[in-house]
Image (spheres, rainbow, N blue to C red):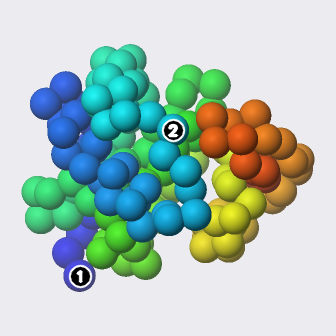
Amino acid sequence: MSAVRIQPARRWDVGAVARVLTACLDEARWLPRVRQARDERRLIGSMIARGEVRVAKRRGRIVGFVILDGAGEVQGLYVLPEAQGTGVAQALLVWSKAQQSRIGLWVHAANARARRFYQSQGFRPVALGDGNDERMTEIRYEWERAA
C-alpha cells in the first residue's frame, strides 16, 4: 500500500474533490440527494478558497478529503469507496487532530460504518439532531486531545 499524502486543496482540485463526493453519495443509497452537482462544486470551491479543505493523495491521485473549519468542526470527510478501509480516513483525521485540540462533527445515524470509525478514533457521541439538509437523524460526535 502506498503512502497517503495530506495537502491543502487547490482551486483546480474542485473537480477531483467533487468526484470523491459524488462516488460516496452514489454508494450511500439510503441518503437522499438534496443538491445538484453544480451546487456541490460551487460549495466545494468556496470551501477550498477559504482554505478549509485538505485532500488525501495516493500516487498523485486524490482519494479523499476533509473539510475542517477554523472552529474545529469537520464539515465533511469522504474517501473514494475503493480506498475505504486503507487508512485514508484515518490519515485525514490524524491531520485534523494535529490542527485542533477539540473536534466536533455530525454523522447520519443511518451511517453505521462511519459511526464505528469515529468511535474507534476516540470520538464520543454527545447529542442527537436533525438539522441537516436531508432532515435525517444525526449523531454529534466530539473528540478532545488528552491534557
For residue 120, what is the image quadrant?
Answer: bottom right
Residue 145 picture location, percent across and down: 72, 49
- Residue drawn at point x = 30 percent, y = 75 percent: 82
Q: Which residue is mark 2?
A: 34
Q: In the drawing, what numbered circle is on residue 137? A: none
Give the residue drawn at x 39%, y 61%.
Answer: 26
Question: Separation of disc 2 and disc 1 at Cα?
Answer: 35 Å
Residue 99 drawn at (x, y percent):
53, 38
User: Which numbered disc, 2 or 1, marks the residue closer to the eye?
Assistant: 2
Q: Secondary structure at mark 1?
A: loop
Residue 94 seen in the current view: yes
Looking at the image, residue 34 sits to the left or right of residue 115; the answer is left
Residue drawn at x 24%, y 69% as measured from the top left: 3
x and y percent of residue 85 in the render?
A: 43, 78
Disc 2 element:
loop
Can residue 101 be seen here? Answer: no
Report which residue position mark 1 lands on.
Answer: 1
Tags 2 and 1 in contact by the CB under 8 Å rule? no
Which amino acid, mark 1? Met
Looking at the image, is 129 positioned above or below residue 107? above
* Residue 90 on image: x %, y %: 48, 64
Seen at 23% across and 82% down, the residue is 1
* N-term mark: 2 or 1: 1
Please determine whether, in this image, residue 130 is positioned above or below residue 81: above
Front residue of this view, candidates 38 and 85: 38
